[in-house]
């Protein structure tokens, strides 16, 4: 019988837990120490679930917390008034925000106008990508513009892969193209387990916009 077996149950449980966590910490510390690469990331938030843009803006807020500058280009939602745009305005020129979309394609019903808006938004995105003062660029709903072939996929992917060293780029929107997924460093597929829209709940202030 070991010394630990002679102790009260609570003490035995505490010591076993401590030993288990010490082993886990050693594994985690070794895993962290093995990561030595630091680079700008291409991040893709896609999938049918809610929260793709919200997650991107969470990263933007984190970056701002470290005193960095952030650029945002909205490819589709330009006509929407959103709480996040108002919130980020409080950071002044540390956030460069361009809402350039004309709305979803089923709203505009004008292919030429949609293509023109996407091209203008992409040109603005390239400006932000080239700006050395910006640490993170959010390309909101770029995946939608690519899905409907408003932009040349190969050119977009090439430009994102050739981004300047150290720049992080987040692309959001459903149905990310395979070529973009392949080029990305991090891809998160947001699924739907349950959505309040299915129960007849409308888009609400502070939740959807």
Image (spheres, rainbow, N blue to C red):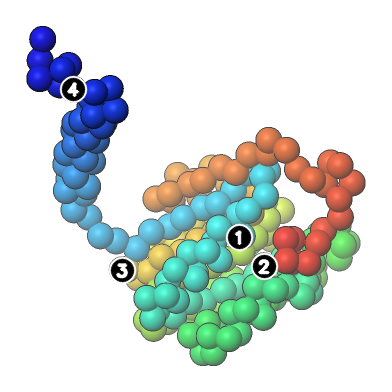
Task: Please indicate, yes or no, whether residue 111 appears anywhere in the rendered image.
Answer: no
Q: Residue at x 87, y 62 (%)?
A: 107
Frontmost of labels 4 and 2 is 4
Q: Nearer the viewer, residue 113 or 201?
A: 201
Residue position marked by numbered label 1 in the rendering: 54
Q: Earlier in the sequence, mark 3 or mark 4?
A: 4
Asked whether residue 61 appears in the rendered view, the answer is: yes
The image quadrant that residue 16 belongs to is top left
Residue 24 in the image, given as x and y percentages of width and height: 23, 35
Of callouts 1 and 2, the N-terminal one: 1
Report whether 42 appears left or right of 74.
left
Which residue is situated farthest in the bottom direction here?
A: 92
Q: Which residue is mark 4?
A: 7
Kindly check if marks 4 and 1 are in contact, taking CB atoms under 8 A apart as contact. Answer: no
Quadrant of the frame with the N terminus: top left
Q: Are marks 1 and 2 in contact (CB under 8 Å)?
A: no
Q: Within the image, what quadrant is residue 168 found in?
A: bottom left
Kind of element beneath mark 2: loop
Q: CA distance from mark 2 to mark 3?
A: 24 Å
Q: Residue at x 17, y 16 (%)?
A: 5
Dot 1, crowdedness within 10 Å: few (<14), some or many (≥20)?
A: some
Nearer mark to the viewer, of 3 and 1: 1
Q: Which residue is mark 3?
A: 165
Tell which tag, 4 or 1, sits nearer the viewer.
4
Task: Measure how far apart labels 1 and 2 are at the Cα level.
Answer: 15 Å
Determine whether label 4 and label 2 are within 8 Å by CB.
no
Q: How many marks?
A: 4
- Left or right, residue 104 beside residue 37: right
Picture coordinates of residue 10, whole percent (x, y): 29, 28
| Residue at the disc numbered 2 | 75
Q: Residues within 10 Å of mark 2 (few under 14, many from 20)?
A: many
């Amino acid at each position: 019988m070991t010394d630990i077996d002679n102790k009260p149950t609570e003490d035995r449980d505490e010591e076993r837990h401590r030993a288990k966590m010490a082993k886990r910490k050693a594994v985690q510390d070794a895993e962290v120490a093995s990561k030595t690469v630091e680079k700008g990331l291409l991040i893709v938030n896609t999938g049918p679930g809610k929260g793709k843009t919200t997650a991107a803006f969470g990263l933007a807020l984190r970056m701002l917390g470290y005193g960095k500058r952030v650029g945002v280009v909205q490819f589709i939602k330009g006509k929407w008034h959103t709480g996040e745009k108002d919130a980020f305005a409080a950071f002044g020129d540390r956030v460069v925000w361009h809402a350039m979309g004309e709305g979803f394609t089923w709203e505009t019903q004008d292919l030429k106008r949609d293509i023109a808006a996407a091209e203008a938004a992409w040109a603005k995105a390239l400006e932000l990508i080239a700006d050395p003062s910006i640490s993170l660029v959010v390309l909101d709903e770029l995946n939608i513009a690519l899905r409907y072939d408003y932009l040349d996929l190969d050119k977009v992917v090439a430009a994102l892969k050739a981004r300047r060293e150290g720049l992080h780029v987040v692309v959001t929107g459903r149905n990310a193209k395979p070529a973009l997924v392949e080029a990305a460093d991090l891809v998160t597929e947001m699924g739907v387990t349950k959505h309040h829209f299915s129960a007849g709940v409308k888009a609400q202030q502070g939740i959807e916009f």
